[in-house]
Amino acid sequence: MNKRQTLRSLMALGLAASALPARTQAPPGARRVGILMGYAENDPEAQLRLAAFKQRLAALGWVEGRNLTLDLLWTAGDVDRATPFAKQLLALKPDVILSNTTPNTTALQRETSTIPIVFTAVSDPIGSGFVKTLARPGGNITGFINLEASLIEKWLELLKEIAPRVKRVAVMYNPKTAPYADYYLKRFNAVTSKFGVTTIPATVSNAADIEKVITTLARPADGGLIMLTDSFMTVQRKAVIELAARHKVPAIYYVGAMAAEGGLIAYGINYVDMFRNAAPYVDRILRGAKPADLPVQQPILYELVVNLKTAKALGLKVPHSILVRAERVIE
């Protein structure tokens, strides 16, 4: 490794060492669950997701401080934290780990082939090598898919429906935190001609990259943005929403909360529900089930959320066809 890589590794190890307290004394007979979150700890939406998981576990009989100990770390969309944090959690010898995002699940998979892992917010578990098949995962990993590749066509359709002027579209993501991007981009590139749009490269790794992409979309005023599901983009969503508003770029997001926070439109699953639904899998594993025998769960319900205030600021009239389909309309 060069000096810069070495420094990053040492910094990540230092973060891991300081982020997790020494192993707490568990009550007699208590089980231990590790949680590796891909979001930022101070993110209110991420806290809602975590709370839903804990509440469902409690309803299933697993109460923190009584018969359950939880060890929690947040990588905040930083892949350099994933491996050292995974090592820290595994050193505590958990009975099962709840993993959030593809990079975190990859890091955990490298470190253990025996401790059960339940993932959330993973798009392509077969392509990522986590499971053999969705019906029979076959190893120590199973979990919950957040979005399917076909959804990117739906995003493009909705974006063109609400902003017909869009002729150039960028799919924004960070390659480090979205190594599965081709899973979506292949489908996207196959349908762009159908919608009469051209693509703009939009890989980003910092705030400056994000601003450059959005300002490029704004000149001329025929650009639109699709924000790919990605932990880095989740952490950076406030900047994306603010820049899109400032430069009047129509954008579609992958979770309803982003439209509620000021984004134009969002279509995707309810992530709070996904975390809530992960608790029964952790419960079953704690009671003896094997991840190899628990099918990977695919999304069933999607929600459409529209922000009328943002649409008005962008000079867009939301079609009735979208309003009647929306689960939530922000006014």
Image (cartoon, grey):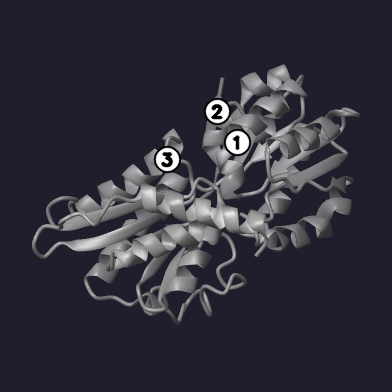
C-alpha gap between disc 1 and disc 3: 15 Å
Amino acid type of the residue that numbered disc 2 sits on in the rendered structure: Glu
User: Does residue 283 appear left or right of residue 38 in this picture?
Assistant: left
Nearest the viewer among 44 and 4 is 4
Against 203, residue 190 (above or below) is: below
Amino acid type of the residue that numbered disc 1 sits on in the rendered structure: Arg
Q: Nearer the viewer, mark 2 or mark 3?
A: 3
How far across and how far down the image is residue 277, in percent? 37, 55
How far across and how far down the image is residue 124, in percent? 59, 65
Tag 2 secondary structure:
loop
Looking at the image, which residue sits at the far left? 28
Amino acid type of the residue that numbered disc 3 sits on in the rendered structure: Glu
Tag 1 secondary structure:
helix
Looking at the image, which residue sits at the far front? 3
Instruction: Please say if the residues under marks 2 and 1 sit with CB atoms less than 8 Å apart.
Output: yes
The residue that mark 3 highlights is: 41
Q: Which numbered marker is on residue 261?
A: 2
C-alpha gap between disc 2 and disc 3: 18 Å
Classed neighbour count for the residue bearing mark 1: other residues with Cα under 10 Å, few (<14), some (14–19), many (≥20): some
In terms of image quadrants, where is residue 244?
Answer: top right
